[in-house]
Amino acid sequence: MRANFLTRLHDPRPMIMGILNVTPDSFSDGGRYTAVAAAVAQGMRMAAAGAEIIDVGGESTRPGAERVTAAEQLRRVLPVIEALRAELPEDRFISIDTTLAPVAEAALDAGADFVNDVSAGRDDPALLDLVARRGVAIVLMHMQGTPKTMQDDPRYEDVVTEVRDFLFQRVEAARQAGIPQEAIVLDPGIGFGKRRDDNLALMAHLDTLTATGYPVLLGTSRKRFMGAVLEVSEPTELVSATVATTALGVMAGVRIFRVHDVKENHQAMTVAWAIRQARRGLPHS
């Protein structure tokens, strides 16, 4: 019997979400998994390496990205979701990375378990109503601007407070649409409309979000702010840096880690979780 994601979400053990971009233009792996067979094989490899969630997206959200129609997103993602659902173990989950209600609904029908929305319900208000009606979870992410404009000189007075307050506003919108509190996940949107120092401040104060009681998703994988610290421009050379943020995130109480490099981050997450549990005098399993 297929596992229930909401039940797993409220188990305190953290999870790895493997990134599966079936797009030609994503910032780190665009074009690698546009063929269905290649995408499914990658999803299965990530699951075998420890990813409990495979996050399937048909629209790039890299800085400067152009919008992709619902019809094109569906052409890209549906065959992959259907094939993954047939092959994945019953305790593995699929999320649909979209901001559009028609894409989310078709993906849920095809076997996705929940919705990951980088616009937090702002692009398509019907998405919140859909999530409420289907009784699934949703990830609400902070972003200043849109993917096309978000890095055009973003500014904050107090990035940690502003991100938290924005997410609370979107939680209220979700609750008004009928989505229960236990089905909401918060994502600070590392790299989405933020400067290097904004991202570092959010990383330094992840406990501000985890203290809200909502599960928190962290997406730092191969992000440019780490490259700026290290003076590294190639995203694939930032695996070790990503692993460091995963370990820090576990210690801060983050629940889901969205990554490209599953094995390395799963190891970091597992060891950090064991250390965190030892600090609290609890078993790590």
Image (spheres, rainbow, N blue to C red):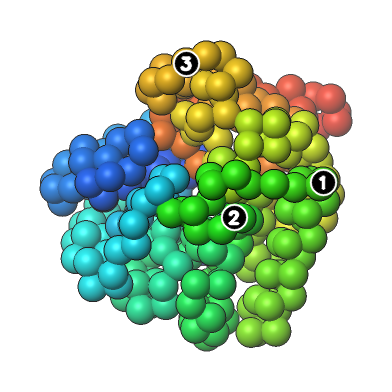
SS at badge 3: loop
Please, what is the three-letter code of the amino acid marked with disc 3? Answer: Val
Query: What residue is drawn where x is 47% and y is 36%?
Result: 259
User: Horizontal placement of 246 versus 82: left or right?
Assistant: right
* Rendered image quadrant of residue 282: top right
User: Which quarter of the rendered picture does the N terminus lie within?
Assistant: bottom left
Give x and y (percent) for residue 275.
Answer: 74, 22
Query: Considering the numbered disc 1 on the image, is that residue within a helix, a strand or a loop?
Result: loop
Badge 1: how crowded within 10 Å, few (<14), some, or many (20+)? few
Question: Which residue type carries mark 1?
Answer: Asp
Q: How far apart are marks 2 and 3 (CA)?
A: 24 Å
Residue identified by numbered label 3: 232
Asked if the residues shown at circle 3 and circle 1 are in contact, with their CB atoms under 8 angstroms apart, the answer is no
Instruction: Measure how far apart labels 1 and 2 are at the Cα level.
Output: 15 Å
Tag 2's secondary structure? Answer: loop
Instruction: State the residue position of label 1.
Output: 158
Residue at point 21%, 41% (across, down)? 31
Q: Residue furthest top?
A: 231
Residue 145 visible in image: yes
Image coordinates for residue 70, horizontal then vertical, percent: 30, 72
Q: Earlier in the sequence, mark 1 or mark 2?
A: 2
Q: Are marks 2 and 3 in contact (CB under 8 Å)?
A: no
**Residue 67 higher or lower than 174, as above or below:** above
Residue 143 bears which disc, if any?
2
The reply to whether residue 50 is in sight is no
Q: Compare residues 113 and 128 and report the one nearer the observer.
A: 128
